[in-house]
Image (tube, grey):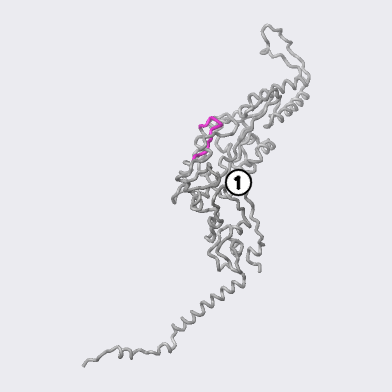
Amino acid sequence: MPRTRTTKKLAQRIDLDYFKRPSPLRRWRFLLSVALPLLAILWLGWHGIRGDRRVYSAGALSSSHAVLTRQCAACHVTQAGFFSEKVSDQKCLACHDGAIHHASQEFTPDCASCHADHRGAIRLAATSNADCTRCHANLAVRGGPTNIARNIDRFEANHPEFAVLRSGAGDPGRIQLNHYRHMQPNLLGPNGSHVQMVCTDCHRSAADSISTWPFGDGASASAATKDSGVTAAKSAILASASARAYMAPATYARTCAACHSLQFDKRLPDAAPHDTPEVIHPFIIAKLEAYIAAHPADLRVPRDPNRDLPEKPIPADYHLLTPQQWVGERTAEAEQLLWRKTCKQCHTLIVEGNAALPKIAPSNITARYMPHAQFDHSKHGLVDCTSCHAAASTSQQSSDLLLPGIATCRSCHHSGAEAAESRCFECHTYHDPAQRKSAHGNFSLAEVQGSAR
């Protein structure tokens, strides 16, 4: 007769007291469930006693703020001894410049909304395009219309042509320069030699301008120093920018003097200074007075047959001048050569009424054509100059604006893995650089290093 298996009989086979007997698994599970939270509390307490709050960090700080890793209160607001997740603008402004981009903007974002930290060793200035286009994709301003482009979302698509080219205006510089003639082969150079000029003979960054210039006047250190300043405004621009980023203005002493001499009298080896007529005039007089004092025989001036007039009496073969008369005549000849030929080759001379000396129109050389954008020539050194400034080799007018257009930049700067960076921050700065100020935090070295208690 077969056995009958019921659930009751099966249940009787189960040991209901198994949990009362010790088990290694249950013992370790109990120990770990108690020990691990206890160790975590002790670990947090130990860091709290030491004042090390890095355990609460959301991640590594950016490279510029990495030194503040132990100083959470430098950026985060404290409330009742604890840190809030929010980063206050006032905390940023305690160290950094907070100048807005435009006074007429309707929306001013919080600092941390664009410069989000705790994302590793990144550049905080390398913001995403979304941070810019949330305003500039549909720009709204206070106070009526503006000439700012209102709908820009990325560089390679609907970014307008650069403003300096979009306006259609020419170069405002007043120096007469023919690039085409200076780029010709076998150009007559210093001492009758034949040369082939290249762009870097005249155009170099401020950092490179201290090296030797092939067509400059190396002996005229004072003239080079004078020309290198140009104006206080241009010097300030060069000082505020990277030493290798922007081209220093070309000057006569560094780029022209070897070929374009300012010699005014064949009897004198000295050339006139590259300066205003008010400086040149007494210089010429002083040189001529010193010469005639050392060569009194030159006061006996022979007659020039080419100046004899028909039906007029032929003057004597020689006439004797006083030193003052000789200096006066030679000065007039020298200045006639300078004002009407030598200086006029490059400069615009203005004669006002009966003024004894002309005025030189300001050179008006532009130091930066795009003051609201950043550009670094040193990072583009791999590319030949004429690849971007294609019109330079054919330009014959000084009014030609030889800047590359946006299409040239887009050939390299566009989206894609094999393209150069094209995000907004690469060229534009939101904050006004003219109002930039240095960081002025009040941490000691011990506090920054986390060793202060």
- Label 1: which residue? 241
Residue 98 lies, in percent from the top left, at 60, 53
Q: Is residue 190 magenta?
A: no
Instruction: Determine the residue positioned at 71% across, 8% down.
Output: 314
User: What residue span does the magenta drawing correspond to?
Assistant: 394-405
- Foreground of the two, 404 or 210: 404
Which residue is more in the foreground, 250 or 266? 250
Q: Check the image and report above or below for 57 versus 207.
A: below
Does residue 268 appear anywhere in the picture?
yes
Pick whichever, 377 or 58, lies toward us.
58
Pick the quarter of the image with the N terminus: bottom left
Quadrant of the rendered structure where residue 10 is? bottom left
Direction top: furthest residue: 311
Majority secondary structure in the magenta region: loop
User: Where on the picture, by quarter, is residue 452?
Assistant: bottom right
Against 52, residue 270 (above or below) is above
The image shows a total of numbered marks equal to: 1
Provide residue 370's location: percent of width, then percent of height.
Answer: 56, 42
- x then y, percent, for residue 432: 59, 48
Q: Is residue 119 above or below residue 317?
A: below
Q: Residue at x 53, y 64 (%)?
A: 58
Nearer to the camera, 219 or 206: 206
Instruction: Residue at 61%, 59% (x, y): give it.
Output: 91
